[in-house]
Structure formats: structure tokens, C-alpha cells
Image (cartoon, rainbow, N blue to C red):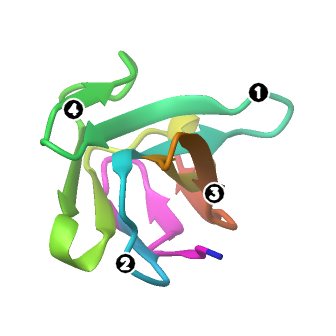
Amino acid sequence: QVQLVESGGGLVQAGGSLRLSCAASRSIIGINAMGWYRQAPGKQRELVATITWYGNTNYADSVKGRFTISRDNAKNTVYLQMNSLKPEDTAVYYCNVDRYYNGNRYDYWGQGTQVTVSS
């Protein structure tokens, strides 16, 4: 069983920065992509950013130019650098791993880390 452990959330003022980290509990074979999603109160979970095994990135329009996703394949760790934070970025942020192995698709989620941006 794969566990994803997130860290780095917290309370920050608008305009500030935070860096989220997500580490897998063990080495994972067959990763397609790792990413971050978020869910604000009363809203659906939405994609923030993803990065493929080969380094191709995808961002939500609302975070382009402010957030940067990166990964360390050797450590099975993905990061999200968040700059110029806005109150509307307040949400629980979830790490995700999309995996394809032995003909099966796997989808792993972290427990979530709270990010609160004050105005």
C-alpha cells in the first residue's frame, strides 16, 4: 500500500509564499504523473498542477505564473512552490499520484494539508 505524506501547509498573509511537499512511503513503479489538487469549503476538488514522469507540467489558469510544481523522481517526492498567494487560494491541498502498472490504473491520494491565506 502506498501512502502519500504531505507537509508545508499553514497560515500566510496575502502576497506571501508557501512550499508544499508530498513524499511517497515507498518507491513506486509506473508513475504517470504526480500532482496537486485543492478543495475549498463548499466547492469541488479542482486541479492545481500536475507533472509527468518526464517533467511535462500542467497548471490551472488561476495559478499560472504564481505556482511551480517540481518533482524528485529518485525520492518519489513532488513539490508545489506557491508565490503571491491570494485569499482565494485558501483550501485543503491534496497530493495525487497517477500510476499505471501491470495493466492496472492506480490513483493515490494524500490526507490533505490546509493552506489559509489571510487578506
Q: CA distance from mark 2 to mark 4?
A: 21 Å
Dot 3: within a 10 Å radius of its alpha carbon, few (fewer than 14), some, or many (20 or more) residues?
some
Q: CA distance from mark 3 to mark 2?
A: 15 Å
Q: Earlier in the sequence, mark 1 or mark 3?
A: 1
What residue is shown at x 36% (from left), y 15% (from top)? Answer: 61
Q: In the rendering, which numbered label is found on residue 109?
A: 3
Q: What's under tag 2, amino acid-wise?
A: Ser
Q: Earlier in the sequence, mark 3 or mark 2?
A: 2
What residue is shown at x 36% (from left), y 53% (from top)? Answer: 30
Quadrant housing the N terminus: bottom right
Q: In this view of the protein, which residue sits in the foreground, 105 or 38? A: 105
In this view, the residue farthest toward the front is: 102
On screen, 109 above or below 23? above
Q: In this view of the protein, which residue sits in the foreground, 23 or 88? A: 23
Q: Which residue is mark 1?
A: 44
Q: What's under tag 4, amino acid-wise?
A: Thr
Q: Is residue 93 left or right of residue 39?
A: left
Tell me residue 4's x, y (percent): 55, 72
Q: CA distance from mark 4 to mark 3?
A: 19 Å
Q: What's under tag 1, amino acid-wise?
A: Gln
Q: What's under tag 3, amino acid-wise?
A: Trp
Magenta region includes residue 94: no
Magenta region includes residue 9: yes
Q: Which residue is mark 4?
A: 57
Range drawn in magenta: 2-19
Q: Which residue is mark 2?
A: 27
In this view, the residue farthest toward the top is: 61
Tell me residue 7's x, y (percent): 48, 77
Q: Are marks 3 and 2 in contact (CB under 8 Å)?
A: no
Q: Are marks 1 and 3 in contact (CB under 8 Å)?
A: no
The local secondary structure at tag 3 comes to strand
